[in-house]
């Protein structure tokens, strides 16, 4: 803690009182581990920055009296605690031990402790000076030259002199075995020394009860006296401490804490936040903070990142609304309801009602081009200060409203005044020359919060609910959430060097550039969505304020987010722990934050004016000491353990650890690892306890590390060994004995079994002889039967050859039929089917038939006609019936996003046909092939109408059963893009006609569909309903979002896909908003009961994306994006191929999975033995 250039009032003051067993702090010390030890009337307290642990005679038997008067750590790290009646207590390796008069102390009242270079410990007691060295005790008293046996203080000089303060006879110097006594009051009685310190230069400082503070030379001669008669606050001095800069810190009985540096005194008292005027102890910790023990509790002074100016610095009130540094270097502070404070040449001056202001609530402040200071008042109009004179301007002078929250001095000399309820008033020389929103314009809503003039001289106005206004001359433009603002509440404006306008709103940090808005919100990593102020520092980092404190967004983070290089930003936060007087900053006033000329930033808060220097922020480079405090099991507690032996059967235990950094302990982070059990480090955040249960027997090593508030890690940390003892039956020798007994049992059993087998073999030999004769007779009979079977086999072979010749003839007929059908389809264009549809041109073909672009003759409208191919697998009753059912299924679905089936039937010529609306565009499969992953918004916009179609189909009793990108068509209309669900050719009717023999039609023993998109219940041949379509839709949405399906075909082929759908969870959706990802994973649940219905799926998707639920067909402007190097011809060809593919029905093929009787079947495929019909 640097002493130069900083007042004691500038240090952040922290306080603890109720956490202590008793408020009076009598002694303070920090040990080499880093613990702070506190002595009170009611016991010894150990503090790690978060937890207080109390040791007294109730909890620690070594304390016969727990009135603690001194605490001292010797060179070996042993802690010595002097008590007032209980002797001295030694603390070493987690154990407290009492040493009293029984061991050799002169008295059990121990007031101070010191150690000389030879290692001897000296104890100042009420009955003399006791020396303890190498377990030998020696006491010196008046008989040996002491002026008094009742001693109070000890201090060791650099030359080895031991200075002793007595309780009534001044000082004694013990040098070379001789006492040299010094009276401090001319030999008068009651010459008490409460505090004693030897400075680095060998001079002595003595705090007395009546003589104040005395400075003596090395021979004991008084050099200087600081007492009441010389202007010192008090004559009773109880604590002394010299810091690293040589400044002397002084605690007095009736005046608080003082510091003497370079000949000047500085004080901090209860008026400045100190808990009590009586200071008893002072201690500096390893991180530079100063701890102060008072009669009212424990205080700490620390050099925080933020200096908070408050009432004890001179402010009239701590609730600051606005701040301004004028051209003369004066700092103006507008207070919430207490007027105006001005800091000029180090002196504060207050202005109130005497200035003529109508109210004391200041809401805005600015300086114009002539150096005049203008204040906007709450219900008080505008106040002007110039050349020491004040002038008030209100509604009586032409203002439209006296409630002024924003003032801005324009470059043309005018003053823009923003009111609450009266819009904007433009003043020149105190006269209103223009108003905006005075009555009827209602552009700003009349409620102004901030006004700024940009480099192009345009005036920008932020409002409280009406968005952002731009006024350029007579042109007025308003921007709201409709134009891209995240919120219509605008609090702050900042124009960057590149012309970007940054906007603090109630919905995040927004920017406006080249006519477009963008936003960073808490979802993107912003600390808070409320931004009251935006201040750039010298490095162009943004400092912002909100209701929860101050936060910084670094320039690199900001630019990476704007460029798309990263999707999240990281903010650094500042709050009470950094020195703020209150976390809540004030906003809705102008300016509520300011960058000063010296580079410091000032923020208005309800607890004062927070000042920080961005380029000079203190950094804590001290890694924290890490300590394992205890191991607690169900039966025992081990304190300060290095090795712990845990008894067998211990179910659970806790390891309590801590790290000793006091600057901001709530920001420290921990990680630990139980080596031998934990495979990796456990990130424990701020938790200081590790829990383990049911550890197997063995030896483990617990390792814990920590970092301080600035992220500096103590990488080595600390460790403790844990030995978990085994039960008797878990020991090696018990296991060996068990193995021996088992071996003997096995050997005995083997011998008994061998004898039994021998007896059995003899009996079997007798039976074999009898049965051999019987088998010979049966063999003769079997030989005769075999000859008859061979004759029958020859007859079967002859008949098989005849069947083969017939099958070859049938195959030839099938090839001829295919050739005839192909030729027929080539000549069909121009003909009229069923007297109603003129075929125009062939646009594609597939396994089930051919699709033509056609015209409905009666209505002269374009349609698509699918002609059924009656050959191969299609030439079956089931195939024809499935073609007919496509028409039935589609007709049952009346939805604008389902492909419309206009007609179906069989012509007089015997041609089966299906008539559909003619679609123009591409399938979703084509778009995915061209574009890869789609944006989240587009993916959901495509899926919502698909969900609506499926919901309508399910309500009509139809399951699609083959939802995939090929069957989702992006139909292009003059109004835009319309999503269409096509191909209900394999749809299942949920309630088929019971009398219909083909109601459940599929291939015999097969399942129809596309495995990559099929649900687990369909792949496993279990009952299913509409939620099977929801699973397929979830797979399609997963593919749109990521560019890949969750279970692609790999080395295992289709079988690997099936295993994935049945048994494996889908990979996480990285980079997808969490709410959207959750809804997708709900649709991909293995159990149908855990999936939403199609309508629920659509509604949840819309809610997760912040979109309205789908309410019918909506044409969008979506278009397919081709690769940049694709030429026009290639694009048309790809579009045509995609359109043809979508209109055609895929012909099914069969995949036969290995039979369960096959010995080579793997366990992974055992449940999958069924026939699957898969698209080619």
Image (cartoon, rainbow, N blue to C red):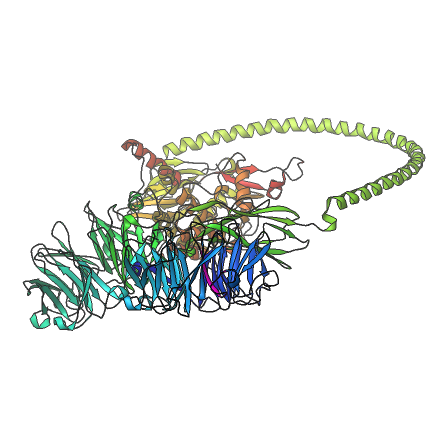
Rendering coords of residue 1158 (x, y %): 66, 36
Q: Is 445 on the left-hand or right-hand side of 1129? A: left
Q: Residue 844 colored magenta?
A: no
Q: Quadrant of residue 463?
A: bottom left
Rendering coords of residue 784 (x, y %): 83, 29
Q: Is 714 on the left-hand or right-hand side of 654? A: left
**Closer to the camera, 631 or 3?**
3
Rendering coords of residue 1056 (x, y %): 54, 39
Q: Residue 148 colored magenta?
A: yes
Q: How many numbered circles are shown?
A: 0
Kindly report the secondary structure that dominates the magenta region of the rendered protein: loop
Tell me the magenta residue range. 145-160
Q: Is residue 637 visible?
A: yes
Rendering coords of residue 878 (x, y %): 52, 44
Q: Is residue 529 visible?
A: no
Q: Is 195 on the left-hand or right-hand side of 65? A: left
At x 41%, y 70%, the residue is 189
Q: Is 1089 on the left-hand or right-hand side of 1094? A: right
**Closer to the camera, 248 or 419?**
248
């Amino acid at each position: 803690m640097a002493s130069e250039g900083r007042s004691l009032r500038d240090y952040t003051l922290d306080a603890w009182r109720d956490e202590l067993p008793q408020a009076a702090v009598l002694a303070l010390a920090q040990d080499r581990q880093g613990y702070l030890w506190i002595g009170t009337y009611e016991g010894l307290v150990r503090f790690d920055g978060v937890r207080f642990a109390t040791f007294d005679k109730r909890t620690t038997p070594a304390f016969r009296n727990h009135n603690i008067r001194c605490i001292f750590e010797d060179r070996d790290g042993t802690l010595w605690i002097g008590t007032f009646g209980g002797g001295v207590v030694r603390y070493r390796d987690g154990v407290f031990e009492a040493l009293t008069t029984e061991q050799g102390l002169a008295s059990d009242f121990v007031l101070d402790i010191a150690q000389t270079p030879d290692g001897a410990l000296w104890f100042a007691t009420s009955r003399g000076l006791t020396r303890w060295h190498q377990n030998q005790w020696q006491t010196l008293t008046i008989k040996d030259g002491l002026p008094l046996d009742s001693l109070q203080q000890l201090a060791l000089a650099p030359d080895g002199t031991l200075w002793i303060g007595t309780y009534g006879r001044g000082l004694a110097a013990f040098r070379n075995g001789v006492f040299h006594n010094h009276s401090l009051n001319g030999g008068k009685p009651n010459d008490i020394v409460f505090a004693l310190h030897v400075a680095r230069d060998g001079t002595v400082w003595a705090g007395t009860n009546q003589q104040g503070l005395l400075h003596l030379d090395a021979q004991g001669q008084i050099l200087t006296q600081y007492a009441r008669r010389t202007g010192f606050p008090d004559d009773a001095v109880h604590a002394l401490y010299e810091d690293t800069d040589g400044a002397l810190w002084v605690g007095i009985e009736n005046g608080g804490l003082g510091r003497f540096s370079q000949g000047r005194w500085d004080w901090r008292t209860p008026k400045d936040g100190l808990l009590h005027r009586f200071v008893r102890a002072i201690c500096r910790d390893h991180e530079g903070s100063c701890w102060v023990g008072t009669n009212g509790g424990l205080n700490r002074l620390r050099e925080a990142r933020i200096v908070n100016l408050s009432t004890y610095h001179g402010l009239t009130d701590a609730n600051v609304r606005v701040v301004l540094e004028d051209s003369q270097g004066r700092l103006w502070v507008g207070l919430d309801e207490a007027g105006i404070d001005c800091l000029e040449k180090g002196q504060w001056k207050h202005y109130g009602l005497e200035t003529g202001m109508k109210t004391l609530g200041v809401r805005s402040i600015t300086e114009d081009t002539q150096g005049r200071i203008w204040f906007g008042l709450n219900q008080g109009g505008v106040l002007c200060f110039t050349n020491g004179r004040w002038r008030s301007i209100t509604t009586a002078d032409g203002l439209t409203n006296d409630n002024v929250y924003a003032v801005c001095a324009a470059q043309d000399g005018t003053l823009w005044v923003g009111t609450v309820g009266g819009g904007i008033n433009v003043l020149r020389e105190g006269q209103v020359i223009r108003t905006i929103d005075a009555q009827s314009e209602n552009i700003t809503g009349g409620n102004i919060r901030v006004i700024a003039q940009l480099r192009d001289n345009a005036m920008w106005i932020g409002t409280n609910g009406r968005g952002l206004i731009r006024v350029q001359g007579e042109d007025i433009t308003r921007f709201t959430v409709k134009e891209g603002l995240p919120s219509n509440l605008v609090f702050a404006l900042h124009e960057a060097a590149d012309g970007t306008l940054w906007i603090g709103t109630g919905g995040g940090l927004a920017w406006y550039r080249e006519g477009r808005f963008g936003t960073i919100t808490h979802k993107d990593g912003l600390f808070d969505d409320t931004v009251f102020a935006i201040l750039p520092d010298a490095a162009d980092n943004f400092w912002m304020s909100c209701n929860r404190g101050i936060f910084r967004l670094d320039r690199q983070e900001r630019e990476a987010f704007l460029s798309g290089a990263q999707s999240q930003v990281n903010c650094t936060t500042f709050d009470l722990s950094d020195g703020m007087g209150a976390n809540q900053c004030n906003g809705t006033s102008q300016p509520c934050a300011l960058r000063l000329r010296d580079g410091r930033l000032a923020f208005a808060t309800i607890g004062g004016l927070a000042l920080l220097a961005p380029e000079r922020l203190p950094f804590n480079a001290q890694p924290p000491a890490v300590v394992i405090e205890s191991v607690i099991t169900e039966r025992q507690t081990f304190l300060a353990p290095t090795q712990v032996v845990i008894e067998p059967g211990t179910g659970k235990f806790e390891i309590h650890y801590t790290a000793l950094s006091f600057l901001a302990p709530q920001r420290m982070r921990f990680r630990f690892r139980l080596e031998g059990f934990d495979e990796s480090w456990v990130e424990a955040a701020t938790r200081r306890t590790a829990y383990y249960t049911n550890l197997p027997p063995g030896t483990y090593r617990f390792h814990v590390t920590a970092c301080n508030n600035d992220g500096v890690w103590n990488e080595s940390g600390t460790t403790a060994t844990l030995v978990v003892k085994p039960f008797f039956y878990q020991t090696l020798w018990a296991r060996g004995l068990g193995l021996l007994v088992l071996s003997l049992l096995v050997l005995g059993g083997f011998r008994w079994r061998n004898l039994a087998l021998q007896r059995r073999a003899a009996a079997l030999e007798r039976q074999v002889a009898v049965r051999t004769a019987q088998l010979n007779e049966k063999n003769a009979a079997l030989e005769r039967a075999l000859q008859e079977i061979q004759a029958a086999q020859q007859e079967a072979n002859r008949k098989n050859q005849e069947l083969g010749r017939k099958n070859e003839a049938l195959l030839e007929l099938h090839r001829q039929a295919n050739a005839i059908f192909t030729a027929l389809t080539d000549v069909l264009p121009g003909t009229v089917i069923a007297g109603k549809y003129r075929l125009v041109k062939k646009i594609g073909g597939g396994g089930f038939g051919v699709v033509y672009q056609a015209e409905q003759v009666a209505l002269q409208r374009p349609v698509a006609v699918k002609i059924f191919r009656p050959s191969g697998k299609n030439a079956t009753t089931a195939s024809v019936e499935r073609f007919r059912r496509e028409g039935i299924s589609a007709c049952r679905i009346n939805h604008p996003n389902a492909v419309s089936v206009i007609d179906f039937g069989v012509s007089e010529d015997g041609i089966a046909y299906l008539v559909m609306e003619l679609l123009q565009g591409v399938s979703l499969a084509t778009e995915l092939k061209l574009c890869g992953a789609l944006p989240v918004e587009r993916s959901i916009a495509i899926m919502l109408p698909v969900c609506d179609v499926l919901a309508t189909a399910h309500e009509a009793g139809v399951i699609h059963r083959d939802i995939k990108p090929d069957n989702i068509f992006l139909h292009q209309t003059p109004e835009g893009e319309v999503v269409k669900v096509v191909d209900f050719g394999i749809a299942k009717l949920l309630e088929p006609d019971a009398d219909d023999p083909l109601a459940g039609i599929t291939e015999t023993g097969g399942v129809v569909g596309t495995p990559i998109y099929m649900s687990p219940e369909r792949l496993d041949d279990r009952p299913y309903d509409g939620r099977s379509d929801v699973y397929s839709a979830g797979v399609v949405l997963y593919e749109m979002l990521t560019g890949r399906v969750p279970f692609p075909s790999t080395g295992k082929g289709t079988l690997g896909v099936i295993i994935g759908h049945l048994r494996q969870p889908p990979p996480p959706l990285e980079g997808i908003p969490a709410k959207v990802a959750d809804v997708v994973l709900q649709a991909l649940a293995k159990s149908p009961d855990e999936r939403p219905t199609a309508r629920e799926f659509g509604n949840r998707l819309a809610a997760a994306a912040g979109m309205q639920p789908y309410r019918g067909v909506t044409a969008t402007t979506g278009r397919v994006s081709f690769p940049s190097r694709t030429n026009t011809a290639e694009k048309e060809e790809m579009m045509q191929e995609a359109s043809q593919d979508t209109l055609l029905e895929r012909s099914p093929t069969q995949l036969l999975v290995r039979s369960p009787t096959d010995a080579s079947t793997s366990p992974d495929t055992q449940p999958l033995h069924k026939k699957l019909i898969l698209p080619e």
